[in-house]
Image: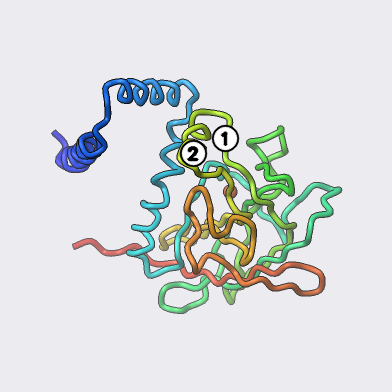
Amino acid sequence: MNERVKQVASALVDAIQKTLTEQRVTEEEWRAGVGYMMKLAEAKEMDLLLDVFFNHTIVDLKAQATRGSTPGMQGPYFLEGAPVVAGALKTYEDDSHHPLVIRGAVRTDDGAPAAGAVIDVWHSTPDGKYSGFHDQIPTDLYRGKVVADAQGKYAVRTTMPAPYQIPNKGPTGVLLEMMGSHTWRPAHVHFKVRKDGFVPLTTQYYFEGGDWVDSDCCKGVAPDLVVPAKTEGGAQVMAIDFVIERPREHA
Ligand SMILES: [Fe+2]
């Protein structure tokens, strides 16, 4: 027996039983629900559905416990082997989307500069796709590793990401529609900040005033992950200072 599994799984079963009872679910509705779960498995969307409804809850729990920056969801489009870039992410050669500069500093939880911290940056193409996952877009586009300097400072140039819809043609999209919800995510940039001896920070940042920022279908938007709208020399500026924390000592 596994005590932790027993504790969590038993609580889940209790919660579902309580809901079935309170909602007076009929046998016909129950069978429709079972059929839906079968379709979800067939469409290989179990992870998508769980991410949409519950990943933000787990990230919120992490946020409550951290001494570092607010974490965000990793999402399904991270690739471990992104190239180190100097100053700019590689974009489509004919990408005329609005320029974006992301810059700031990485500090440790005692306020010291996190020299040499490596920041994985990845975001959508101007049409809301991800390299390495959609349309055979080469994996080195719109993603890269940026290294913080001796003062912990970093800067990288790219173009604005776009809002996009999560896969919405399958059972997950059908359910969201029946629940009166849409399938849009606001434009955002993903980050993973790593340095030896520190807990990796995975997060996403959003643009103030952007479409869907107030109604992300994945509920990933925390107030301090929304950066104020700022432009400079014709480019949008996303100014972010990251704080990474040391692992907690367990008694
Ligand atoms: Fe994303």
Disc number for residue 203: none
Q: Position of residue 161 (x, y in %)?
A: 69, 53
Q: Residues within 10 Å of mark 2 (few under 14, many from 20)?
A: some
Which amino acid type is shown beneath numbered disc 2? Leu
Q: Position of residue 42 (x, y in %)?
A: 46, 20
Q: Position of residue 69 (x, y in %)?
A: 46, 67
Residue corresponding to mark 1:
168
Q: Is residue 234 left or right of residue 200?
A: right
**Extreme residue toward the bottom, this view:** 111
Give the quadrant of the N terminus: top left
Residue nearest the observer in this picture, 233 or 50 = 50
Q: Is residue 114 left or right of residue 12?
A: right
Disc number for residue 176: 2
Residue occupying image coordinates x 47% and y 53%: 219
Q: Position of residue 197 (x, y in %)?
A: 41, 62
**As displayed, is residue 129 above or below residue 203?**
above
